[in-house]
Image (cartoon, helix red, strand yellow):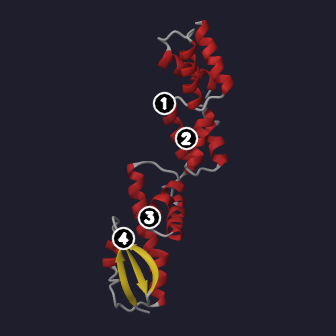
Amino acid sequence: MTITSVEKLKNKNMVRVFIDNEYSFTIPTEYYLKNHLYENTEISEEQLSHIRGRILVEAAKEKAIRFLTIKDRSQEEVINKLKDAGFDSNTAQKAAEELKAIGYLDDTRFALKYINDRIRTKALSRRAIAFELQRKGLDPEIIEKALSEFEIDDFEVALREAKRKFGKYDMSDEKTAQRVYRFLTHRGFSHEISVKAIRTMKLD
């Protein structure tokens, strides 16, 4: 087998390698140079298997660790970031699994930290937090278990946040009440909780 052509990916430090005129794999330029994968180079099945099974996975793991040092991420987020960087799905999945096995990736730990940060920085309902975590690819069981670690009273959170943002306004004004309602429902609070919070503020 022969490497017949190499294409550099636009805006990415990656190259696509073609063997016998067919696409074979995408690899970081650094690893491409280190392993002398130049055009017209002969390559054996054993070498190709090693590249796909180990070299690409190690390169993806190194890239993933860089992502994680910048920001904590879920396993699915890391996989998607690796694919966006140019790695194929299989390589991204293998890299994530290996990082999970050595503790770099842990969706339970991620969920707990994420929930704690969201409670501290932005008052959201349990439902809204769960939805955000679902969008990050977390398993529903992990989400539910993580949420159970926190005492989140939706009514108390909604009331506190509504008072913080609208406490100085006249709650007897219907337009103000509607603004509060839209604000709370946008944060994921139910109709019942939102109405109860507004009613409580009117009585204060």
Report if the CB atoms under discs 3 and 1 are less than 8 Å apart: no
In this rendered view, identify the residue nearer to me: 30 or 18.
Answer: 18
Label disc, if present, on residue 14 of the rendered structure: none
Q: Amino acid at mark 4?
A: Leu
Q: Amino acid at mark 2?
A: Leu
Which residue is at 30% across, 78% downward?
33
Q: Amino acid at mark 3?
A: Lys
To which residue does mark 1 refer? Answer: 120
Name the front one of labels 4 and 1.
Answer: 4
The vertical placement of 160 against 10, above or below, is above
Label disc, if present, on residue 61 of the rendered structure: 3
Which residue is at 66% across, 18% downward?
196
To which residue does mark 2 refer? Answer: 112
- Residue 75 shown left or right of residue 37 in the figure: right
Quadrant of residue 115 in the image? top right
Q: Earlier in the sequence, mark 2 or mark 4?
A: 4
Name the front one of labels 1 and 2.
Answer: 1
Q: How far is disc 3 from disc 1 in space, using C-alphas?
A: 31 Å
Q: How far is disc 1 from disc 2 in space, using C-alphas?
A: 12 Å
Quadrant of residue 145 in the image? top right
Q: Earlier in the sequence, mark 3 or mark 1?
A: 3
Residue 138, how many percent across, how many down?
59, 50
Label disc, if present, on residue 9 of the rendered structure: 4
